[in-house]
Every structure is written in structure tokens, then in C-alpha cells.
Image: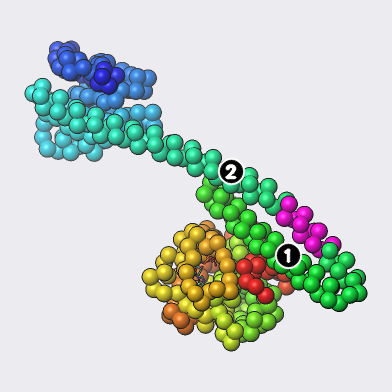
């Protein structure tokens, strides 16, 4: 039944040959269109969209090889399979040339009808499978786009009420300060703190989801400016010092570099460093140490964040950069997370044409190493980003919100 709808374009300038081929194929139930020249073939292929083109190489106007190349380079006809046939070009080299020009198969005349039909059927089977796959892919892309759009809308909608809650909590804090009854004041502050931390956790999750949707839909942009990256990393590290030290973890920033100006996106560098530091803090117990080092290595700048925490087993080291993956470890009971952080860190590093790797000894600690090429964008002025610690406090609350103080 389906065979009746299968269209084959039969291209040959020799009317007798064309007639014979059309007769064999029509008898087998295919719908045949004919073309006697290269130009006619190109036009009909585009308009009629046949399932298969049988193309004689020896054509009066455009050579069959050239027709083949043009069909394959035109998006409207590139997926149509082509069976090249020839009685003149019969050497192995001609055969190879035909396939190199984009033909999917090559036959030498005279062709016996049962051979022709077997080849045509096999090519049409592949064409049918490919067509179904293309349709399935299109449908999957459409569903994925709807999902991405939905996630983007919901994420934005979620941000507004959380910001309202945070403003209200800020106001309640001011009122709590005025309460004289100490035990009530303490309880209310405690509850207020819990609400605030969990609001920050939601903001972090939403920010991460928004970033994922932007990356997936290709809307994540980079705005590179020339900045002193040493200063950025140092300031971020300093901004979290008291938080980390309160958890009895030593935090050391060390570098021989005075400054290193490179073209990067400061917001993304900030997210990368905050993420690595928050993980290092999360997975390092009291009495541990976190070292942040920076050094120049040829044309790259290397940033390493080393901790003396729980470490990562070898089988998990590559997996942790995959989205939503968390290594289930009983030691990491005091912290939570969504498993999005490192996949975003990796994406941001790669947007800077950099690389990220991890070295770890299970039970002894981990070192995350980022290598970024030093690039200076010409014509762009060097930007002085305000990276004073106070500027980072809100960011720290958000990025460290998975860790209970
Ligand atoms: P999460 O937001 O859950 O922390 P990440 O993508 O940042 O997600 O990290 C994924 C997983 O990688 C974590 O759940 C943890 O198992 C592991 N991991 C990341 N950083 C460290 C580290 N410094 N020490 C030990 N394990 C880590």
C-alpha cells in the first residue's frame, strides 16, 4: 500500500533507457517522475521531493557528478538518496568519484531489473528509517523547547515571590531588634534566620535552573572585559573568610602574581570560584584546610582550590561534572545540594575556552584545577570591577546557602 506513494525521480537524457527504467519501476508499484537534463532534475527534485533519485551520470547540460553535488549541498534536497548509474563511466575510479560526489550507490549499465529493484528497495528502506528518525528528532526538539521555555518562565516567576519574602524578613529583623523579651527575641531571630537561609537556597536553585535553561537554549552569553583576575579570586576568597573560619576551617589564598589582566566574564568567574569554595567548605570538616592558589603557566592562568575534606572516589571523579549528580556519601550528611553546581562551573570554564579537572584522594581531600587562557580583548578598556567584600556578601549568602552555619 505504502509503495504507491513512493516517488522516484528517473533522470536520463536517453528516452529509451528512461522509458525502460520507468516501466520496471512503475510495474513494481512506484510513482515515477522523469527528467531529461541536469537542470530539470534539480528543479523537479526540489519541487517534488522524491524518495529516491536515479541519476544517469552522462547528461547533456550539467554532468551527473555535478548534479549530485548540487543536490547534496542544497538543504531542500540534501537528504534525498541518489542512485547514480552509468554506461560510460564504468571504471572503479568513476564509481568512487560518484560516491564522493554524494551518491549513495552506483550501478553500471546494463542493469538487470531484479538487481535494480533490490538496490532500490534497500535504499528506500534506509530512506524510510532516516525519515522516521528525522521526524522523531524534530518532535523531541519541539518538546525540549517547550520544556526549556516552561522552565525559564517558571524560574523567573519564582524569583519574584522569594524576593518579596526576603524583603519582609529584612523588615521583621528590624522589628525583632526592638523586642525587649530576650527569649522571644532569640527564638524569632532563629526562625527568621532559617527562613532567610532557605529563601537563599531557593534563589540559588532558581539561578542555577535559569542558567541551565539559558545554556540549553543557547542564550547564555559571555561579556568579556579586561579585568585583573587575581584580584577577583582574592576578593571572593577574602569575602568568605569569616564564614569558613567559623566552621573551624583554615582558608589560605596564595599566589606569586601581583596582578594578571585577562579578558573574562567577571560574573561567571565569580560563580565558578564561589561554587568551588562552597563545595570545598561543604565537604571539609572542622580542623580542615582550604588552599586557593593561582599561578601563571605559559599562556594560561591556573586557579586551584584544594581542600582536605572527604575526597572523591576515583569512579565518581568524572561523573561529578555531569548535571544533577551527587555522590552519595554518609559523611556528607550536614549539607545539601542539587548536583547542578559543577556542571555549570564546567560550562562557564569552557565558555572561557578553559579546562577544569579534579585530583583527589578519597578520604584525604580534593583539588579542583582550572586552566584559563590569558587573552586580552583589544579596544576594550580595562574594567575595574567593584569586588569589595561587602559587594560579595549577598552572593555568599546565596552560594553558601546549602551549608548550615
Ligand atoms: P551540589 O550542588 O550538590 O554540591 P555539585 O555539582 O557542586 O553539586 O557537586 C556534585 C557532587 O560532587 C557533590 O554532591 C559531591 O558529591 C561532589 N563534590 C564536589 N566538590 C567536592 C569536594 N570539594 N569534595 C568532595 N566531593 C565534592
Q: Position of residue 179 (x, y in %)?
A: 90, 71
In this rendered view, identify the residue nearer to me: 153 or 393: 153
Task: Say if the magenta span includes residue 164.
Answer: yes
Instruction: Locate residue 108 relative to residue 26 in the image: left or right.
Output: left
Labels in figure, total: 2
- Residue 162 visible in the picture: yes
Instruction: Locate residue 285 relative to residue 398 in the image: left or right.
Output: left
In this rendered view, identify the residue nearer to me: 106 or 284: 284
Q: What residue span does the magenta drawing correspond to?
A: 161-171
Q: Position of residue 247 (x, y in %)?
A: 64, 81
- Residue 18, compared with residue 330, is above or below; it is above
In this rendered view, identify the residue nearer to me: 27 or 189: 189
Q: Quadrant of the C terminus?
A: bottom right
Secondary structure, mark 2, is: helix
Q: Which residue is mark 1?
A: 196
Q: Position of residue 266 (x, y in %)?
A: 63, 63
Say which residue appears at 43% left-offset and 65% top-offset: 319
Amino acid at each position: 500500500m505504502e509503495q504507491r506513494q513512493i516517488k522516484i525521480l528517473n533522470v536520463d537524457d536517453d528516452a529509451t533507457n528512461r522509458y525502460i527504467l520507468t516501466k520496471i519501476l512503475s510495474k513494481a508499484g512506484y510513482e515515477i517522475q522523469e527528467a531529461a537534463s541536469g537542470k530539470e532534475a534539480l528543479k523537479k527534485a526540489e519541487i517534488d521531493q522524491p524518495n529516491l533519485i536515479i541519476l544517469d551520470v552522462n547528461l547533456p547540460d550539467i554532468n551527473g557528478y555535478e548534479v549530485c553535488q548540487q543536490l547534496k549541498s542544497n538543504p531542500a534536497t540534501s537528504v534525498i538518496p541518489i542512485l547514480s548509474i552509468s554506461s560510460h563511466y564504468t571504471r572503479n575510479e568513476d564509481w568512487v568519484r560518484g560516491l564522493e560526489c554524494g551518491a549513495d550507490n552506483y550501478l553500471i549499465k546494463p542493469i538487470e531489473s531484479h538487481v535494480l529493484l533490490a538496490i532500490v528497495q534497500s535504499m528506500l528502506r534506509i530512506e524510510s528509517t532516516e525519515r522516521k528518525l528525522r521526524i522523531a528528532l524534530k518532535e523531541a526538539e519541539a518538546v525540549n523547547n517547550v520544556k526549556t521555555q516552561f522552565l525559564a518562565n517558571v524560574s523567573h516567576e519564582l524569583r519574584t515571590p522569594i524576593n518579596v519574602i526576603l524583603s519582609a524578613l529584612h523588615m521583621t529583623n528590624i522589628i525583632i531588634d526592638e523586642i525587649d523579651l530576650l527569649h522571644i527575641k532569640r527564638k524569632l531571630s532563629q526562625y527568621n534566620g532559617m527562613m532567610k537561609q532557605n529563601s537563599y537556597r531557593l534563589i540559588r536553585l532558581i539561578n542555577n535552573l535559569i542558567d541551565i535553561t539559558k545554556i540549553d537554549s543557547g542564550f547564555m552569553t559571555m561579556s568579556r572585559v579586561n579585568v585583573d583576575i587575581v584580584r577577583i579570586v582574592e576578593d571572593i576568597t577574602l569575602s568568605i573568610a569569616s564564614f569558613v573560619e567559623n566552621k573551624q576551617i583554615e582558608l589560605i589564598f596564595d599566589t606569586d602574581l601581583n596582578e594578571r589582566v585577562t579578558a573574562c566574564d567577571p560574573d561567571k568567574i565569580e560563580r565558578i570560584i564561589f561554587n568551588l569554595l562552597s563545595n570545598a567548605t561543604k565537604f571539609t570538616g572542622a580542623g580542615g584546610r582550604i588552599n586557593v592558589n593561582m599561578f601563571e603557566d605559559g599562556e594560561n592562568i591556573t586557579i586551584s582550590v584544594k581542600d582536605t575534606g572527604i575526597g572523591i572516589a576515583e569512579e565518581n571523579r568524572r561523573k561529578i561534572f555531569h548535571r544533577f549528580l551527587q555522590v552519595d556519601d554518609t559523611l556528607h550528611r550536614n549539607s545539601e545540594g542539587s548536583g547542578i553546581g559543577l556542571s555549570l562551573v564546567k560550562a562557564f570554564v569552557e565558555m572561557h575556552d578553559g579546562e577544569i579537572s579534579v585530583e583527589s584522594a578519597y578520604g584525604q581531600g580534593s583539588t579542583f584545577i582550572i586552566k584559563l587562557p590569558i587573552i586580552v580583548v583589544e579596544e576594550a578598556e580595562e574594567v575595574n570591577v567593584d569586588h569589595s567584600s561587602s559587594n560579595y556578601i549577598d552572593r555568599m549568602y546565596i552560594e553558601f546557602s546549602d551549608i548550615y552555619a
